[in-house]
Image (tube, grey):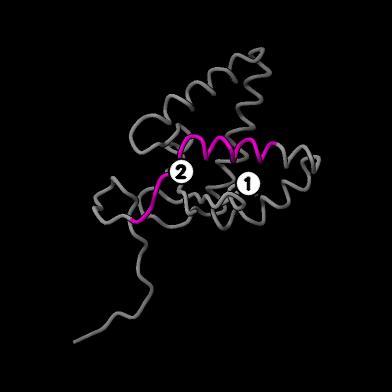
Amino acid sequence: MTYNNGPRPPLPLPGEGSSQGSFRYASFQHRLGAYALDATLAVLTLGIGWLIWSMIVWGEGQTPAKKILKIRVRHFETGGVATWGHMAVRELLIPTTVVIASNLTAGIAAVVWIVIEIVFYFTKNNRTLRDLWVKTAVINEA
């Protein structure tokens, strides 16, 4: 008889073949609060403090506001915490791309992006377009 005392793989997220999933998706209001708190922290720290803090906590699958509000980003297929790279794409690369596109389209891209994010949130598993692209889900740990 052999025993496997190694680390166990994380549970899959609810809705992905797991009837025992222990994760709860973050609500729209919880995520909106995190966006507002991140924006406030960025303004108060002139963006520099927020960016430094973000780079530290991205490895934990969080932003500064997500850390305060006990929200974590997890890989959707495995349930593991999102990597630093996933978080950099989610929180820096995609928003930067939207800002550039908004400047080129006189703000139309920003409005379209916000509408798409909200509409996608109310689909299966509360995942936005950004979550689908990066294969993540936002989990409430509170």
Amino acid type at circle 2 is Ala
Residue under pointer 1: 65
Whole-percent x and y of residue 41?
72, 42
Is 35 part of what is drawn in magenta?
yes
Whole-percent x and y of residue 126?
40, 36
- Quarter holding the N terminus is bottom left
Q: Secondary structure at mark 1?
A: helix
Q: Secondary structure at mark 2?
A: loop
Q: Mark 1: give few (<14), some (14-19) or many (20+) Cα within 10 Å.
A: many
Q: Is residue 59 above or below residue 37?
A: below
The answer to whether residue 47 is left or right of residue 77 is right
The answer to whether residue 94 is left or right of residue 82 is right
Is 42 part of what is drawn in magenta?
no
Of 30 and 105, nearer the camera is 30
Whole-percent x and y of residue 95?
61, 32
Distance from the alpha carbon under mark 2 to that under mark 1: 13 Å
Highlighted range, magenta: 22-39
Q: Are marks 2 and 1 in contact (CB under 8 Å)?
A: no
- Residue at 26% across, 56% down: 20
Residue under pointer 2: 26
Q: Mark 2: give few (<14), some (14-19) or many (20+) Cα within 10 Å.
A: many
Q: Is residue 108 above or below residue 57?
A: above
- Residue at 42% across, 57% down: 80
- Residue at 49% across, 27% down: 117
Of 137 and 109, nearer the camera is 137
